[in-house]
Amino acid sequence: MGQARDPPGPKQQAAAAAGPASVQEVRQLVSELRLAGQTRDLLDEVYNRLADEQQLADPDLPESLAQMHRGEYIVRRQPTG
């Protein structure tokens, strides 16, 4: 019989919701991470890489960065409490 597994944590849930990454893409990322000496927390690292790629692919990113560079941004803080 299989062992009971803990429910997925926030990073695992976010990784699953990050978008449809192909198995081949994830395999390639894991291979690159291992070649770079990363052998622990691979799920977190794969998620981080996929999230970075998703943000870099955003067509609004260059303009947003230019606005930040010019000082044209607003800091919105989450309400505490």
Image: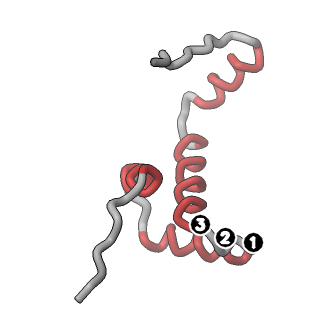
Residue occupied by mark 1: 36
Q: Position of residue 77 (x, y in %)?
A: 55, 17
Residue at (55%, 62%) from the top-left corner?
A: 46
Circles 1 and 2, Cβ within 8 Å, touching? The answer is yes
Image height check: is 52 above or below 1?
Answer: above
Residue occupied by mark 2: 33
Q: Earlier in the sequence, mark 1 or mark 3?
A: 1
Task: Name the amino acid, label 1.
Answer: Ala
Spatial separation of the CA atoms under disc 1 and disc 2: 5 Å
Circles 1 and 3, Cβ within 8 Å, touching? The answer is no
Spatial separation of the CA atoms under disc 3 and disc 2: 10 Å
Residue occupied by mark 3: 41
Q: Residues within 10 Å of mark 1 (few under 14, many from 20)?
A: few
Residue situated furthest front in the rendering:
81
Of the pair 29 and 59, the residue shown nearer to us: 29
Residue at (56%, 28%) from the top-left corner?
A: 60
Q: Where is the N terminus found, in terms of image quarters?
A: bottom left
Q: Is residue 35 left or right of residue 16?
A: right
Q: Is residue 5 left or right of residue 75?
A: left
Q: Where is the C terminus found, in terms of image quarters?
A: top left
Q: What secondary structure is found at the residue carrying circle 2? A: helix
Q: Position of residue 9 (x, y in %)?
A: 41, 55
Q: Is residue 72 left or right of residue 10?
A: right
Of the pair 66 and 1, the residue shown nearer to us: 1
Spatial separation of the CA atoms under disc 1 and disc 3: 13 Å
Of the pair 29 and 47, the residue shown nearer to us: 47
Q: Residues within 10 Å of mark 3 (few under 14, many from 20)?
A: few
Name the mark nearer the viewer: 1 or 3: 3
Task: Name the amino acid, label 2.
Answer: Leu
Q: How many numbered discs sit on the rendered protein?
A: 3
Q: What secondary structure is found at the residue carrying circle 1? A: loop
Residue at (60%, 31%) from the top-left corner?
A: 61
